Amino acid sequence: MQEIELLLKGCAVNFETARKIALTVAGQDEEEPMLIAWHDRGRDKHSPSCVKCEIKGVPGWEIYGRNHGGRLRISINNDEYVFIYS
């Protein structure tokens, strides 16, 4: 899986802003990227939300994303927001 890390300074970043930025980045090489999994550390929310396990220190939502076609992991502000796209 390709990993991209973005660090945004000088502006407030909320989930919706981070999601739009990640979608723009994911869409650069894929016409219609599909969001497979995501995590919002500040609100302690993730999707899929039913995945609560952890395997070898990796959260279940991230394992789900990797195992369900995830090809691109976009981290914003040191994993404050993480998006996995197919």
Image (spheres, rainbow, N blue to C red):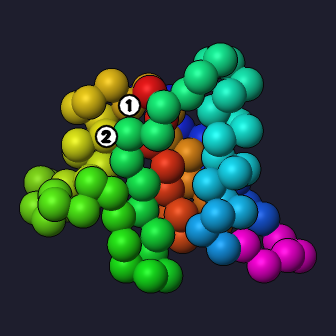
Q: Look at 56% across and 46% down and name the residue there.
A: 74
Q: Quadrant of the N terminus?
A: top left
Q: Look at 69% across and 51% down and name the residue there.
A: 20
Tell me if 49 is positioned left or right of 21 in this view: left
Is the magenta region chiefly helix, strand or loop? loop
Is residue 29 or residue 35 the one in the foreground?
35
Circle 2: is it few (<14), some (14-19), or many (20+) Cα within 10 Å?
many
Q: Look at 44% across and 82% down and name the residue there.
A: 43
| Amino acid under disc 2 | Gly
Q: Which disc, if any, is residue 70?
A: 1
Tell me if 27 is positioned left or right of 64 in this view: right
| Amino acid under disc 1 | Gly
Q: Is residue 51 above or below residue 44?
A: above
Expressed as whole percent of the image width and height from the top left, the position of residue 34 reads 48, 31
- Secondary element type, mark 2: helix
| Disc 1 + disc 2, Cβ < 8 Å | yes
Q: Which disc, if any, is residue 65?
A: 2
Note whether residue 58 is visible.
no
The magenta span reads: 9-13
Q: Look at 62% across and 54% down and name the residue there.
A: 19
Expressed as whole percent of the image width and height from the top left, the position of residue 5 reads 63, 49
